[in-house]
Image (cartoon, rainbow, N blue to C red):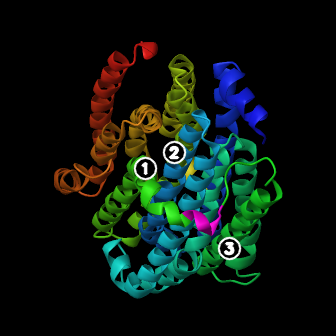
Amino acid sequence: MNKYERIQIFEKMPPVKAAFNQILPAIASQLVILAYNLTDTFFVGVLNDPVQTSALQVVYPAFTMLNAVSALFGTGGAAVVARALGKKENEKAAVLSSIAFWTGLGGSILLSLGFLILGRIILPICGATPENMAISMKYATYVITLGGPFAVCSNVLACLVKSQGEARAASFGISLGAVLNIGLDPIFVLPKFLGMGAGGAGLATAISNACAMLFFINHIAKTKETRVIGFKPGSLRQTNEFFGSILSSGAPTCILNALAVVAVAAQTNFVSRYRVEAIAALGIVKKLDQIPLYVAMGIGAGMLPILAYNYSSGNKKRCHDIFAAGCTASVAFCVFCTVVYELAAPRLCSIFIKNEDTVGLAAAFLRRMVLAMPSMAFCNPVVNLFQAGGRIKRATLITVIRKGVLDIPLLALMDRLGPLYGCMWVQPIVDGSAMIVTIFLYLKFRREEPEFS
């Protein structure tokens, strides 16, 4: 994309149209990612073995740490690159993107090596039991130890491509990896093919993320005449000058993902005290509640560059209009999902496994946990707005309240008040509390920025 096309989208196109020009491709890529996550659960569920299904849930908190690294360098990089472009500082944007890529790669390699050394200590903390430890470790070896750098780099590059207005290219690259994963899953998982079970799902994910990463590297190399972003190693000489701004901008989303690891691991640990069917049920629910979550994340990821660009260029009225369009879409979709899940919980859960005990538990869990979605749908876009506008402390405060301050104490309390099922009320309570704080901070932001009133 050349600078004239970027200016047309970021500055000239009507705000609502510009918002959805960036949001829809981001949502599409998130939904394709969700589809391959659901496909993992579906094909492992076809084996009708709660032990293998539970392994995916056990590894999920550790895998989420890869998302935290991706968010730190991808979201942080995208925000600072878009702000630089809004100020017409193209050379600075190129340097920032290179630093974000190489530090993201380094961080992912360190995380993968850390898991290689400590995996057998980490997984029991995440809820692994003697019954599912072996298969959990096999799955994690593929998706984290082997595939971790591929997953992080593909996501960081996707964020950087979006930061210069190429939402469609970013969506295509992520979707390419996801579609490949969907095609490989049955081949690696099912007994009539390679029969690797849950481990095969992990290997399919690693291969798919590697292909997505290669697509982005090729795309950036092919468009060198018109692009701004790059990955020149020489830019690392300026790391000390710019690294702090990348970290601070990506910190709220990174913290959200990192604390989600703690929250999900704690919840899985509480549930694992009961029986393996309960862990499998929680894994199914975590897949289903990702539909509204991923749409909200897609809206935020699509909005962030265009919000940061317009805020830094001083066009705050346009920034407000784009935010309002995205936030409205996020809340409306999540309210719709809440209603559907409440009405059709057993039928939806039975898609993934036919074990009646597991389906019954999953339906009960889903009807409680999904009540958090409307609150989350409002908090996420506000966090993105604060990141775009440089209100990093406020974005971080909302994040810490949503994931970190209340989760574990509430898990202990609610599990005591209502064994097993009480744990499922924690997220609605936490997100409801976060929404109250978010409304207060957003109203304060509106008073500071008259264009948002």
Dots 1, 2 in contact, CB < 8 A: yes
Q: Give the extent of the magenta segment.
A: 231-235
Question: Which badge, 1 or 3, comes first in the chain's sequence?
Answer: 3
**Mark 3 touches mark 2? (CB < 8 Å):** no
Magenta stretch, main secondary structure class: helix
Query: Does 71 sit above or below residue 138?
Result: above
Q: Amino acid at mark 2?
A: Val
Task: Say which residue appears at 22% left-offset and 48% top-offset.
Answer: 406
Label 1 vs 2, first from the N-terminus? 2
Task: Give the residue number, with chain letter if any, for mark 2.
Answer: 80
Q: Position of residue 368 (x, y in %)?
A: 37, 43
Q: Is residue 246 magenta?
A: no
From the viewer's perspective, is the residue at label 3 or at label 2 nearer? 2
Give the crowd class for mark 1: few <14, some 14-19, many >=20 residues within 10 Å.
some
Q: Which residue is mark 1?
A: 245
Question: Which residue has dot 3 on it?
Answer: 204
77 left or right of 245 in image: right
Q: Residue 119 appears at what percent x and percent y?
A: 40, 82
Question: Is disc 3 surrounded by few (<14), some (14 to 19) or many (20+) residues within 10 Å?
Answer: many
Q: Residue at x 34, y 57 (%)?
A: 259
Give the mark nearest the N terminus, 3 or 2: 2
Q: Nearer the viewer, mark 1 or mark 3?
A: 1
How would you rate the neighbour count of disc 2 (Cα within 10 Å): few for under 14, some for 14-19, many for 20 or more?
many
Residue 338 x %, y %: 48, 35
| Residue at the image point whose x is 38% and y is 48% from the top | 252
In front here: 329 or 342?
329
